[in-house]
Every structure is written in C-alpha cells, then in structure tokens.
Image: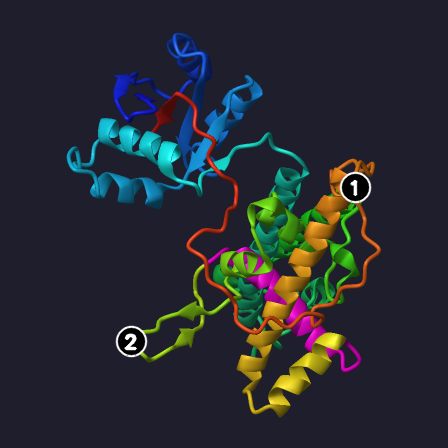
C-alpha cells in the first residue's frame, strides 16, 4: 500500500512472494520517485525483500510488528485485522514513529551472526547425540556407566560389549551409529569454530580484550548487536540485552525487578563472560563480585550486577571499534581494533535508565511511504 505524507492511501498492490517480487514492486512504485519502503520485520521474515530493495538503491525502514499492531488498534477506523489495514498501519508507523530504523546492507555482522548461531546449533545437536549415546550404552552395560563420557571412553566400552540376541545386537549397532554421529558432530564444531575465529579476527574487534571473551562470545555480541549506533547509551544497550532491571513501580513505591526481556543470546554472552571472570580470583570481575557480596548481596544478585558491568564493557568496546572504523581504519570486517583499557567492572552506573526505545535512528520523512506486509 502506498500512503502519502498526510496518511492518505494512494494505491495498493498484492503480490505473492516469488523471484520477481522486488522487480514487480519497483515497477508498481515507479510513479512515486520520492519514496521510502516500510517493511514489517526486516530482520526476520521480511529480511530478504528488505535487502533486495536496499540493493536496488531504495530507502527501506524496519517497522517492528508490535509497534504497527498498536497503531492499527489505536486508529479511529479500520481496526480489523486484515492485510490492507496492516499495510496502512505499517506505513503510518514508518511516517510518524521516531524509533523506526533504516535498513542497511548486510555486512560482517550478518556473517558473524550466522556462524555464531551455527556454532550454537551444532553444540546443542552434539549434546543431544551424546545423551542418546549415553542412554544406549547404559542399556548395554550392566550397572550403567558414569555421567561424563568421551568418544574414546565410549569406543572402549562399546568394544568390550558382546551382544547376545537380536535386541542387544540392535542396541549395539545403534550405539555404534551414535558414536559415529558424535565424531561427525565434533568435527563440525571444530570446523565452525575455525571459521568463526577467522571471521572475528577479520573484524579487528577489541571485544576479545575483555577478560572471558573469546571468538564465540565476540561473534555473538557483534552479530546480535549489529549497528551499535542505534543504541543512544549504555543504558539502552543494557535494556536491549536484558541486563538492566525493569521498573514496576506504583504510586510512592519504587520497585525494580529482574528483566526477562531483551535479546537472550546477548544476555547469555554477558552471563558466560561474568561466570568466567568469577572463576578467576585475580580478575577485576571477581573483585567486583566479591565487593557486592561483601555489601550483603546474594550470589545471584552480585552476578546480575556483574553482568551489567559486562554489558557496559561490551558497549564501550563496540563504540570504540565503531569510532576507529569511522576514522578510516582499514579492516576487512568494518570493525577496527582498540587499544583503550576497559574491563567488565570498569564502570558503575548508579541507576540503569529504561527507555521506551532502543534506537536513536530517526525517521526522515519523505512525501510518501510504501508498506509491505
């Protein structure tokens, strides 16, 4: 649907997702040369179309589904849930909201995001195979085996098994197949980690200078964060990754509770970094953790406080990398290295600010907007 700056419908077109979707949309929109495209969920289901339009030189805005739904429900009319009303709500959101972010071409962040998620999926698959192998061996060995097994140990146990009968023979064959699957899974994990480490090195990021951050966590942070400039402050970044508390105050009673919101992959990266620092007594993170427990906080509360410091360290390094890249530092991935000193316990925000928006990118309005549902 095409909508003017005054929110008046100018036309609409319904097409099916196909190889010619971008070409057909551009042909239809030719009468409106000064245009912007509003795509709902440009980071999800609308990602391919958004990138096709960006590659064609179009200006594309990413509209969050929840925001567009609120606009539709609060409209004076046309509140029914259907494609035309949804498209109009998306277009109006792109015109009026200051939180809408402009879509940029995929870069190294997309590469790191793909490989970090691939590594995560392979790790989960390996755990599943190992659990099934353990269960199969327990059915073959009287008394079972220990909880922790390795490929070499499993191979020795399986070699000592002499199956008797068709059932035991089938179990032994199943265990052998699972052992082969586990070997393949380990090889896939190793190869993926190599690719991921190479991609992280290519960015020149300084995130790996943080104690407890290796290539896997660095790739997760860069890939899930994307363009760090969309976060106005470290508080906005903490709200996005769920390390900032959520205010649930009422009247004179001020209450903050643990946030279950935000990007859980980023939250997990901060958690693993904090746990690693706590394990090493000489780290600044462990010193900060001990300080909080000495103040009377529980171990969980101290860990949450440390995770917030880790989030601030992530943000500081990402901003420093972006500044160095903007100054023209050469880097294959777009992130330049950083020689500044930063640690997870290096900053101490007093009151985490909670913001209604995580983006500071403003919507520069154009005479008309085309929405894609």
Of residue 37 and residue 211, the one placed in the foreground of this image is: 37
Query: Residue 182: where, in percent of width, then height?
Result: 64, 55
Q: Is residue 161 visible?
A: no
Q: Nearer the viewer, mark 1 or mark 2?
A: 2
Residue at left 74%, top 58%?
214
Q: Residue at x 43, y 65 (%)?
A: 260
Q: Is residue 146 above or below residue 74?
A: below
Residue 302 placement (x, y as % from top left): 58, 81
Q: Provide the residue designation for mark 2.
A: 251
On the rendered structure, is 314 left or right of 136?
right
Disc 2 is placed on an element classified as loop
- In reply to whether residue 80 is colored magenta, the answer given is no
C-alpha span from label 1 to label 2: 52 Å
Q: Residues within 10 Å of mark 1 (few under 14, many from 20)?
A: some
Of 187 and 5, the residue lying toward us: 5
Instruction: Point out the stretch of residues depicted in magenta.
Output: 262-283
Side of 158 relative to 340 (left or right): left
- Give the vertical position of 291 relative to 224 (above or below): below
Tell me what residue is drawn at x 68 percent, y 38 percent.
108
- Residue at image position (39%, 77%) is 255
The dominant secondary structure in magenta is helix
For the N terminus, give its image quadrant: top left
């Amino acid at each position: 649907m095409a909508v003017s700056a005054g929110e008046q419908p100018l036309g609409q077109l319904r097409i099916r997702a196909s190889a010619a979707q971008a070409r057909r949309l551009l042909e239809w929109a030719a009468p409106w040369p000064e245009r912007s495209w509003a795509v709902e969920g440009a980071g999800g289901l609308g990602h391919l179309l958004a990138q096709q339009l960006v590659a064609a030189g179009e200006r594309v805005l990413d509209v969050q589904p929840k925001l567009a739904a609120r606009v539709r429900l609060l409209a004076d009319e046309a509140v029914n849930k259907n494609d035309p009303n949804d498209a109009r709500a998306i277009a109006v959101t792109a015109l009026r909201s200051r939180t809408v972010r402009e879509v940029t071409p995929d870069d190294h962040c997309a590469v790191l995001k793909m490989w970090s998620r691939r590594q995560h999926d392979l790790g989960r698959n390996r755990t599943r195979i190992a659990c099934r192998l353990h269960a199969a061996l327990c059915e073959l060995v009287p008394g079972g085996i220990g909880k922790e097994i390795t490929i070499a140990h499993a191979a020795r146990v399986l070699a000592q098994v002499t199956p008797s009968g068709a059932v035991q023979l089938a179990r032994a064959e199943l265990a052998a197949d699972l052992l082969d699957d586990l070997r393949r899974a380990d090889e896939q994990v190793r190869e993926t980690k190599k690719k991921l480490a190479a991609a992280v090195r290519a960015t020149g990021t300084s995130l790996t200078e943080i104690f407890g951050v290796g290539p896997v966590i660095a790739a997760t942070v860069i890939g899930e964060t994307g363009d760090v400039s969309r976060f106005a402050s470290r508080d906005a970044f903490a709200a996005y990754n769920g390390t900032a508390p959520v205010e649930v105050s009422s009247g004179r009673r001020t209450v903050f509770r643990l946030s279950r919101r935000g990007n859980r992959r980023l939250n997990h990266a901060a958690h693993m970094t904090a746990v690693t620092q706590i394990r090493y007594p000489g780290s600044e993170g462990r010193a900060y953790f001990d300080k909080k427990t000495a103040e009377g906080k529980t171990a969980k509360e101290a860990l949450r406080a440390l995770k917030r410091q880790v989030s601030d360290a992530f943000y500081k390094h990402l901003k420093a990398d972006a500044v160095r890249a903007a100054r023209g530092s050469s880097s294959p991935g777009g992130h330049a290295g950083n020689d500044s000193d930063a640690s997870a316990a290096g900053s101490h925000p007093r009151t985490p600010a909670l913001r209604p928006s995580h983006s500071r990118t403003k919507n520069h309005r154009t005479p008309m907007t085309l929405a894609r549902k």
